[in-house]
Image (cartoon, grey):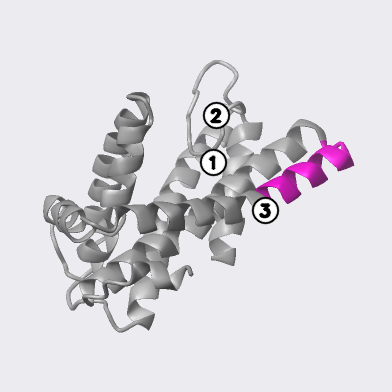
Amino acid sequence: MLVFVIVVGGLGAVSEIGGATDPDRLWGFGFTFDAGTTILGGIAGVAALIAHVVGSYLILERMLELRGRVGSGGTRIWAYVGLALLTGFGMILGLLFLIVPGLILAVRWSAASGFLIARRAGVIEAMGASWNVTRGHSWPIFFAGLVCFLLALVPIVAVSSFIEFAGAGPVGAAIGTGLTDAITTAVFLPLGISVFTLLDEGTQEIGEVFA
């Protein structure tokens, strides 16, 4: 995860410095290729997106492997890309409609990556399986996600405060944004695997993990 934060955060910072990323975004990747975008910034922006997706997949696969839950067969990276696109689009669309639908989708699809990688399920099948197993567990998963969000705020506030205190300027701000983007992702990745592992094993007491 440390390597993930350094690589993805660094590429994101170079992308923003090169004018390929909107500096006003809260987090995530928002390319803004225009006359002010440098070649290096554009390359870094694309590289950051690729590193984000591939790095996320490798972390998820490794976490499942450590629990002995990775199925046999080849890599599922392309299926994971499809899953990320479909679930990401659905959640963004849901967030645009009064926020609540997006949160519901995020909760109900939280275990999809586990089914995709460990159970070798197809993209739609993984989304459906996650939707089914999370039924009745939405509130514990939501509050677990809220805990992850609050945990992510600690390094985000620390990095932002340090950048502002040091008066690092635009370059420092870009580094801070890139790192906080990567940190947020790194904090949330284990949540989906935890939900999948608990529910796939038939555990009904998810709330006890966070008691």
In the depicted structure, whether residue 79 falls above or below residue 16 = below
Q: Check contact, mark 3 vs mark 2: CB within 8 A.
A: no
Callout 1: few (<14), some (14-19), or many (20+) C-alpha neighbours within 10 Å? Answer: many
Determine the residue positioned at 42% across, 66% down. 59
State the residue position of label 2. 20
Quarter holding the N terminus is bottom right
At label 2, which amino acid type do we have? Ala
Mark number displayed over residue 44: 1
Furthest-top residue in this view = 35
Mark nearer the N terminus (2 vs 1)? 2
Q: Is residue 88 above or below residue 134?
A: above
- Asked if residue 110 can be seen in this view, the reply is yes
Determine whether 12 is above or below 148 in the image.
above
Q: Position of residue 5 (x, y in %)?
A: 58, 57
Other-residue count near label 3 (Cα within 10 Å), few / some / many at <14 / 14–19 / ≥20? few
Q: Can residue 55 be seen in this view?
A: no
Q: Do the residues labelled 2 and 1 touch (CB within 8 Å)?
A: yes
Q: Is mark 2 on a helix, strand or loop?
A: loop
Point out the stretch of residues depicted in magenta: 155-168
In magenta segment, residue 162: yes
Q: Mark 1: which secondary structure? A: helix
